[in-house]
Amino acid sequence: MDKLTIEEYQQKYFYKIELVQLCRQYKLPTYGTKAELNQYIIKYLSGVPAKNIKAKRCPSKKAQHLRANQITLNTKLINSGFSFNNEARQFFANYFQVDKFSFKKSMAIIKRRAELENDDTITVGDLIKKMQTVNTKATHEEHTYQWNNFVSDFCSCKQSNIFTNKLKVAAILWQHVKKSTHTKTFDTQLLNQYHAEIKSFIK
């Protein structure tokens, strides 16, 4: 494998076993937490000679991964034994009261950033808050996308030409569609269904 640039490295997500392989390839210390391995690699890719990069601590008894009942909102994301495994999956399933929980990409990104910055202050509780913020933003973007498509489809149909203010009519119809359980798309039947509310905008 060719030597990565620091930009390429920071854009990818690596599992710990992959970090160990990279450290071995670059002749860096292969022992330590994932955050420590990240620091070794970043230093090396930033131009620090491998011989000048020393392990932060000597090997000791391997840290045990936390069980689901040992994880709390105050558990640190790094250097605590927390990992995205079945135990963590069970913790999140219990927390969100769902039968099955799937890890989100945003969770991996947040943990990855903590590892890159060696930030051991971030907790599982922080992870949940940040993840929910990211998910809320994604939901907002999805709604915006749906609204834009709805307006475009409405304005493109011939029936919309009879209205003086197409955007206002589209907004009225969209409020009904948004609250319904149907797909969030424009259908000409909406013009008949909500005729009483939009007839004042007919030319």
Image (tube, helix red, strand yellow):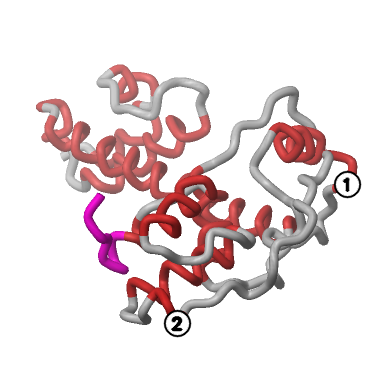
Q: Residues within 10 Å of mark 1 (few under 14, many from 20)?
A: few
Q: Are marks 1 and 2 in contact (CB under 8 Å)?
A: no
Task: Look at 70% across and 62% down and name the residue there.
Answer: 59
Query: Residue at left 50%, top 71%?
Result: 39
Apparent side of residue 5 relative to residue 55 in the rendered image (left or right): left
Q: Main secondary structure of the magenta part?
A: loop
Q: Position of residue 47 (x, y in %)?
A: 31, 80
Magenta residues span: 1-8
Reading the chain from its start, which is encountered first: label 1 or label 2? 2
Q: Separation of disc 1 and disc 2 at Cα?
A: 38 Å
Identify the image quadrant of residue 34: bottom right
Three-letter amino acid code of the residue under disc 2: Asn
* Disc number placed over residue 70 in the picture, else none: 1
Circle 2 is placed at which residue position?
52
At 81% from the left and 35% from the top, the residue drawn is 94
* Residue 63 point in image, percent of width and height: 77, 53
**Foreground: disc 1 or disc 2:** 2
Relative to 3, residue 64 above or below: above
Q: In the displayed structure, does residue 17 sit left or right of residue 80?
A: left
Query: In the visual, does 51 lie left or right of 1?
Result: right
Amino acid at pointer 1: Gln
| Callout 2 secondary element | helix
Q: Where is residue 118 shown, x and y percent of the image?
A: 59, 72
Q: Residue furthest right?
A: 69
User: In which quadrant of the rendered image does the C terminus lie?
Assistant: top left
Label 2 crowd (10 A; few <14 / some 14-19 / many >=20): few
Rendered view: 196 above or below 146? above
**Left or right: 180, with 65 as reference point:** left
Q: Give me the disc on residue 100.
A: none
